[in-house]
Amino acid sequence: MARKDEIGRWGEEIAVGFVEQLGYTIVERNWRHTMGEIDVIARDVDQTVFIEVKTRSGRGYGHPFEAITTEKLARLRRLALAWCRAQEHPPTRIRLDAVAVLGRPDRGAQVEHLMGVF
Amino acid sequence: MVVARTRGIALSGLDGHPVEVEADVSHNLPGFVIIGLPDAALGEAKERVRLAASNSGCPLTDRKLTVNLSPASLPKHGAGFDLAIAMASLASAGSISAASIRDVVHVGELRLDGRLRGSVGILPAVVAARRAGISTVMVPAPNAREASLVPDMTVLAVSTLREAARWHGGDYPESNEAVEETWDPDPVGHRGQTTDPCPGDLKDIIGNDEAVSALIVAAAGGHNMSLLGPPGAGKTMLASRLVGLLPDLDDEASLEASCVRSLAGFSLVEGLVTRPPFESPHHTASAAALIGGGSSIIRPGAAARAAHGVLFIDEAPEFPAAVLDSLRQPLESGRIVIHRARSTAYFPGRFQLVLAANPCPCGNYGVRDAECTCPPNTRKRYLGRVSGPLKDRIDIHLNVNRITAAQLRVAEEDGKRTSTAEARARVLAARSRAACRLSGSPWKTNGEVSGAWLRSQPQRLSPATTVSLDRALETGFITMRGYDRVLRLAWTLADLSGELFPHRQHVGEALLLRSGVSL
C-alpha cells in the first residue's frame, strides 16, 4: 500500500474513533459505488450522517479542509443519494459532515469536525 | 469568533462615502467570500488579503470567512479596501482587537508580501472620513504626508500588514526587515507638477500691451476670454501667463483642487496645491478626457483638474463640437456632473476658460503682408465650429496680432513692461475691492455676477455713464446678454483703476474688449 493510502486509512480510523466518542453509531465504512466512495456513514440520533474524511500529514499544501472542494462535496451528495436509494428503508434526515485529521501515525493527530457543510 | 467591523471609504468622483466592512467567520469549509457590490479589482482582494496575511505571518482563519461591504447598494471599486478587509478578517478570528479597529478608517492596497502600496485619492478619502465624524485613519506610509494635509485627523501610517495588525493589538513579533518606501502612482494618472504650472513671466511678452492689459482685466474679474490671431502671434504665451496673475487659492479651493489632483494620480508629497492649476488639453481630447468619465471608476477630466484655475483650449475650432459643448454645463453651474448607469460623480467645475483660435485654417486671414488662401465659406465654417452658446459665455474677445519689427524695436528701447508680480498686485487689489463690494452676495468675482443684480439698485449705473452701451444695444450691435457682460467688464475696469463706480470711459473700454472680432 502506498504511503498516502496508509495515512488516509489511519486518518479514517482516527475519524471513526472521534465520531464514536461523540455518540454516533457507525452504519457503514468505505461504501463503494461507480461514482466513488463514501468514507464513513454514521447515525447521530435521528440523522444519517455522511462523513468525508481528509487526512494530511502536514500543512505544507494547506489545511486538510481546503482540499474538500465544492466538486467533491457535490459528488458526496450524489453518493449519499445513491446510498439512500439502495436502502430498504431510506433515512428521512441526512447531513454531510467533514472531518480533518492533521498528523502522522507516529506523531499523533489533531482532529477537526465540521457539521452540515453542504 | 465575532462579527468584526471597521471602516473604508468608497469614492465616487470627489465625494467619499464611509463603507462599513464587516467580517464573520462561520464553521464551514474554508472559503473567502466578499459581498456588497465589489468590482473586479475589489473582488480579487480575497486572494491578495489571504496571501498577504499568511506571508506577513498573521494568517487568516481556516474556516469560512464572509466579508460584507455595506451599504450593499453603493458600488465600490479599487484595491483600497484591502487593508480594511484584512483588519476586519483578523479581528473576527480574534487575532487582533475588534474594539480597536471599529472607529478607524483603513485605506490601502496590499501587495502579496504584506507590504502596503500607496494609492490615489487618499486626500478625498480622508476628507470624507472627517466629514463622517471619524478622526483616525490608517494609511500606507507613502501616503502619510498627503493624509496629514487634512486638519484635525490622527493619521496612522503603516508600511506592512503586520505593522497594522500589531498596532491593533495583534500578538505578532516585530518584523525586522527593512521596508523600502516607494510611491506607486496610478499607471493611468500623471505625476509631478505641484506648485506653479507655468513659470513664465508677463515681462516676456513684447509689444502686445493691449493684450497684456486685457489679460489683467480677465484675471481681476475672473472673466472667460478668447484669443483670436494668426500662428506665432503669442496666443499660447499670453494664455500661459494668465495663471501667474491669479491670486493664491484660499483654503477651501486649495483643498478641493488638491483632492482632484490626488484623484487624478498626482503625488501630493509637496503639500496642498496653493497656486491655481493650468490645464491645456490637446484638441484630440474626447468629451470624457475633457470633463471626466469612465465606466466604473469615474476619473476627473482636464476641466475638473483646472478647477479654481485656468482651462486653456488651444486651437478651439479643431476640437469636435460635441466635446467643446460639454463645457457648457460646468460653465453654467460651476460644477461637473457625470452620469453613468451605476453612479453619478460630481467634480468642481469653476474654472476660467481661455479659448484660442486661428482666424482661418491657413492662419493668415487678416495678417498684413500675408495672403489667406482659404475660401470665405471655409473661413466662416472654421470659426462657426465653436458654438454660439459657448461664445456667449466669453466676456473678453481679444485679437492678437503678430508684432512688427518696428514694434519690437520700440518695445525694446522703451523697456517698460509689466512684470507678473506687479500685475498680480493690481489683480489682488481689484479682487479685494470686488469681494468687498460683493460681500453678502453669492459671488466672489465680477465674472460670476448675474446681470439682473448689476442692473438693480444700488449698483445700477446712470444713463449718462452707459450712453455708449445703450446705443450699441439699440442698434443691435450687442444683445441683452452682451449688455450684461459689458457691465461686468466695466465694473472690473473700475476695480482695477480704484474707482467706486465705473465711468463712461470704463464702459467704453469694456465695450471694446467685448466686441473684438468674435470667434
Image (cartoon, grey):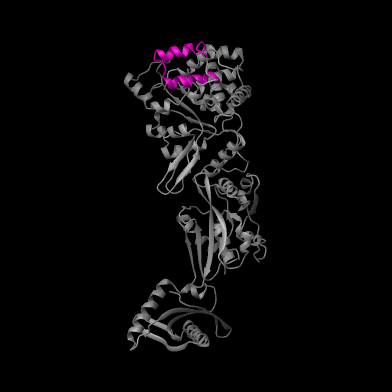
Q: Position of residue B478 (x, y in %)?
A: 42, 17
What residue sits 62% from the left and 55% below the top?
A: B159
In the rendered view, tell whether residue B287 sits above or below residue B97.
Answer: above
The secondary structure that dominates the magenta segment is helix
In the rendered view, tell whether residue B431 sits above or below residue A7.
Answer: above
Question: Residue A13 lies in magenta, yes or no?
Answer: no
* Quadrant, the C terminus of chain B: top left
Q: Position of residue B138 (x, y in %)?
A: 61, 54
In the image, the segment drawn in magenta is B462-491
Question: Residue B480 lies in magenta, yes or no?
Answer: yes
In the rendered view, tell whether residue B330 sits above or below residue B293.
Answer: above
Residue B278 in view here = yes
What residue sits 47% from the left and 11% below the top?
A: B468
In the rendered view, tell whether residue B65 sits above or below residue A79.
Answer: above
Q: Position of residue B510 (x, y in %)?
A: 50, 17
Near-viewer residue (B240 or B296): B296
Near-viewer residue (A82 or B360): A82
**Residue at far front of view:** B457
Near-viewer residue (A56 or B354): B354
Q: Position of residue B447 (x, y in %)?
A: 52, 26
* Quadrant, the N terminus of chain B: bottom right
